[in-house]
């Protein structure tokens, strides 16, 4: 049976993504100096103003105004005509220490494997065989389009673009496999003087057709570019941005489930981040090993305890070994305690600003240790089934 599925992404100039990048830039600066710091950093961006608040316990000194200005400059808000200028924006901070009640559970056992979870909650990781990066195709292409929007702006290929933007991709599926792209939506902030026809043609030719595989586009594919006809006012001038308000963009575009916790601005002791990254790692290796076409890993914690309350693997009926056996393999061979996650994925590093835009998953960046495929052969061996019975890639 056929169906349509849509996911969206946003550019680095979107106000919510500005906030995420600032929060993670502050986290990185602190981790460079103090890898055991406890950081929960929230950012709000509005017209000409950035507010940074949160709970941080560290021996480091972070020059927050400088970090904010450097991040905004890199994004490209450099003119007050856009309603935001890195040189002149106001910056307010309100930083407290980590709650001592939380510290009891997280720090009470030192740096041992029994370090407790920093909060209760549930986390999910997901993978499927629709793309070479084991991501759902709608969000995978939406991210690539958003990144291309930023690239053509910064490289002056489309010099009329401004930093804010959103992308959206609708895939037509047949028998649960991606068949074609039904629609592409681009909202791109621009200078006031550009003609709409020039903008639309430029985006279709230099963004859409440079990113999406030609075999997925046909005469029925619909292109929607700035459908109001004008997108001059954008960024924090148009919308208030806040850390953690793009959690579906950050993960799988609506595929699978989401526990509700954001990633950006949180040090790796926060299970919202560390456990979600390991869950993605496990799910990705299971699919890459051919044990399932789709895989979701669900983990739950309570504050102060290291061992998760539950770990569950679900494969949507696509598994090639009994689901109970697959669950047992995961529980016996992957350690979801916060301490071992941090050590195994080498997470006490200043690597997080890069994650804050264009997705935390599905990117083969050297820092993204949770995207490694180093458990594929192990999972094949331990599953104990013939190579001929393993699933082959179903991606387009």
Image (spheres, rainbow, N blue to C red):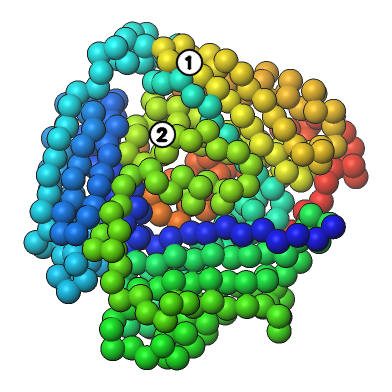
Local SS, label 2: loop
- Residue at coordinates 46% horizontally, 11% vertically from top-left? 305
Most foreground residue, 34 or 93: 93
Q: Earlier in the sequence, mark 2 or mark 1?
A: 1
Label count reads 2
| Vertical order, 123 against 164 (above or below) | above
| Vertical order, 341 against 366 (above or below) | above
Most foreground residue, 339 or 232: 232
**Of the two numbered discs 2 and 1 in the rendering, the one whose residue sits closer to the viewer:** 1
Q: Quadrant of residue 133?
A: bottom right
Q: Position of residue 359 (x, y in %)?
A: 48, 52
- Residue at coordinates 21% horizontally, 37% vertically from top-left? 53
Q: Position of residue 170 (x, y in %)?
A: 63, 65
Name the residue carrying label 1: 302
- Residue at coordinates 45% horizontally, 31% vertically from top-left? 272
Residue 28 visible from this viewpoint: no
Local SS, label 1: loop
Q: Position of residue 112 (x, y in %)?
A: 41, 13
Residue 135 lies left or right of residue 87; in this view the side is: right
- Neighbor class of circle 2 (other Cα within 10 Å; few <14, some 14-19, many 20+) is many
| Vertical order, 48 against 54 (above or below) | below
What's the CA distance linking mark 2 and mark 1?
21 Å
Quarter placement of the N terminus = bottom right
Residue 347 badge: 2
Q: Position of residue 34 (x, y in %)?
A: 24, 30
Q: Are the residues at dot 2 and dot 1 in contact (C-beta closer than 8 Å)?
A: no
| Vertical order, 353 against 231 (above or below) | above
Quarter placement of the C terminus = bottom right
- Residue at coordinates 67% horizontally, 58% vertically from top-left? 5
Residue 243 badge: none
Residue 95 visible from this viewpoint: yes
């Amino acid at each position: 049976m056929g169906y349509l599925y849509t996911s969206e992404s946003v550019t680095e100039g979107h106000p919510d993504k500005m906030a995420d990048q600032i929060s993670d830039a502050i986290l990185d600066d602190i981790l460079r100096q103090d890898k055991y710091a406890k950081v929960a950093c929230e950012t709000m961006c509005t017209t000409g103003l950035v507010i940074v608040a949160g709970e941080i316990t560290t021996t480091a000194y972070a020059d927050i105004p400088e970090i904010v200005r450097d991040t905004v400059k890199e994004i490209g808000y450099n003119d007050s005509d856009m309603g935001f200028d890195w040189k002149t924006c106001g910056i307010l901070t309100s930083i407290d220490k980590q709650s001592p009640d939380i510290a009891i559970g997280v720090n009470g056992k030192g740096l041992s494997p029994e370090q407790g979870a920093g909060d209760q909650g549930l986390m999910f990781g997901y993978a499927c065989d629709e793309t070479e990066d084991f991501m759902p195709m709608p969000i995978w292409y939406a991210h690539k389009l958003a990144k291309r929007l930023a690239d053509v702006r910064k490289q002056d290929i489309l010099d009329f673009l401004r930093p804010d933007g959103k992308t959206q991709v609708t895939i037509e599926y047949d028998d649960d496999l991606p068949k074609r792209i039904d629609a592409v939506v681009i909202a791109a902030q621009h200078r006031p003087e550009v003609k709409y026809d020039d903008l639309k043609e430029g985006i279709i030719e230099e963004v859409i057709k440079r990113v999406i595989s030609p075999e997925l586009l046909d005469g029925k594919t619909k292109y929607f570019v700035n459908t109001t006809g004008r997108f001059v006012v954008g960024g924090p001038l148009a919308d208030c941005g806040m850390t953690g308000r793009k959690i579906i963009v950050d993960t799988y575009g609506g595929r699978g489930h989401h526990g509700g916790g954001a990633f950006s601005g949180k040090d790796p002791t926060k299970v919202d981040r560390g456990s979600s990254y390991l869950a993605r790692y496990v799910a990705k290796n299971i699919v890459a090993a051919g044990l399932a076409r789709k895989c979701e890993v669900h983990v739950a914690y309570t504050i102060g305890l290291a061992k998760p309350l539950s770990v569950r693997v679900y494969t949507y009926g696509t598994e090639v070994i009994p689901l109970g056996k697959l669950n047992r393999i995961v529980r016996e061979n992957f350690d979801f305690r916060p301490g071992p996650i941090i050590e195994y994925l080498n997470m006490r590093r200043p690597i997080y600003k890069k994650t804050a835009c264009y997705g935390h998953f599905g990117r083969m960046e050297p820092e993204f240790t949770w995207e490694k495929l180093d458990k594929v052969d192990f999972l094949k061996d331990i599953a104990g089934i013939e190579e001929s019975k393993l699933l082959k890639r179903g991606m387009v």
